[in-house]
Amino acid sequence: MPTPAPNPHLPFGDQRGAPWYGKDILSVRQFNREDLEYIFAVSHEMRTMVERVGTFDLLKGKILANLFYEPSTRTSSSFTAAMERLGGSVIPINEVKYSSVTKGETLADTVRTLECYADVVVLRHPETGSAAIAAKAARKPVINAGDGTGEHPTQALLDALTIREELGHLDGLTITMLGDLKYGRTVHSLARLSSLYKVKLNYVSPDLLRMPAEIISELKASKMEQTEHSSLDPVLAETDVLYVTRVQKERFENEADYEKVKGAYVIDKATMKSAKQRMIVMHPLPRVTEISMDFDEDPRAAYFRQMEYGLYVRMALLAMVLGKA
Ligand code: ASP
């Protein structure tokens, strides 16, 4: 559903009638181009405020429950930092093994509990569709911070912001996704989000790790230009954004398959000689061996800058669902 334009005169006011107030953020399918423009604008404001004052009281008195059933460094800590920079506080549940989950409590009951104490729940869970289940059980907003191999919408939003900030626009770009396109939820979300723009998508992966057919046909229906390859060579020179992913070891049913593909691609200084000078290399992180450290100093290596954009996007999203942006 298209979102009504926000009130430009009240960028940080109390807007209980604001379009995102009380909403869940479960999938990138919820967003249209105008929404993205709005999120980029609010994220930009957040950046300015952080640079100017560090912390401010927009969400003073609000509480976030950060519920993580899977490991996380960036997503978990950037949501915490986002809430605290906005003057709010956080209930961190990073080790569900110390919570009632180990006593057999269902996800729905855990979320119902947390929303008694918090105003918004951020959830990471190993099962696809878990965020939607949690959102159904909860009255307060649920933000999907990664549901199995499904989606990672807040990552895709920060990825899109990174591309916009680094290259100025998304329309007309060629984005090449490399590595584990089967299990990588970040590429599932980013591919879907890219369909809002005039972007060409190249998928480069071993046969075992190809982009799921249902995503390819979903994007075909929206007239997206997509190509599939097993080698980076044919597409590197035309690439504006090289989006590298980790082979998701934890999703494999057998170790032998993981062993076959784990070192399939390595981006290093030598590989990048045939790429454009004005392009960027992104990675949702953590990286294992797929980007060599010898490339980190190259100005095209955007993956460390990318994680900083995550803070501003998550500040924007928290302010939006809590009715303050
Ligand atoms: N941090 C990202 C995710 O949670 C990417 C990864 O783990 O490889 O999906």
Image (spheres, rainbow, N blue to C red):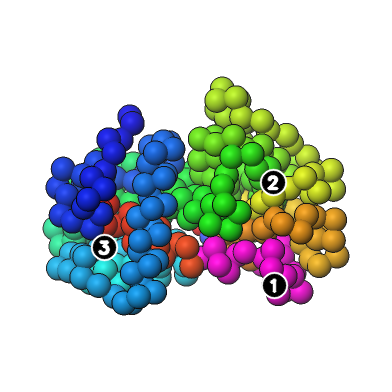
* Mark 3: amino acid: Ala
Q: Residue at x 64, y 39 (%)?
A: 172
Residue at point 85% right, 61% down? 273
Q: Residue at x 77, y 45 (%)?
A: 238
Q: Do we see residue 32 in this rendering?
A: yes
Q: Which residues are magenta?
A: 288-307
Nearest the camera: 38 or 32? 38
User: Residue 127's spot in the image, x, y percent?
Assistant: 44, 47
Residue occupying the far top of the picture: 221
Please provide percent x and percent y for residue 237.
Answer: 81, 48
Q: Amino acid at mark 2?
A: Thr
Question: Which structural element holds mark 2?
Answer: strand
At a point 26% along the width and 48% down the height, the residue shown is 8
Asked whether mark 3 and ligand 1 are closer than 8 Å, the reply comes as: no
Name the amino acid type tagged 1: Asp
Secondary structure state at the residue bearing disc 1: loop
Q: Which mark is residue 176?
A: 2
> The N terminus appears in which quarter of the rendering?
top left
Which mark lies nearer to you, 3 or 1?
1
Label 2, label 1: how far apart the Cα atoms are:
19 Å
Visible in this render: residue 128? no
The residues tagged by marks 3 and 1 sit, at their Cα atoms, a distance apart of 34 Å
Read off the residue under disc 1: 296
Tell me which corner region of the image, top left, top right, bottom left or bottom right, holds residue 268: bottom right
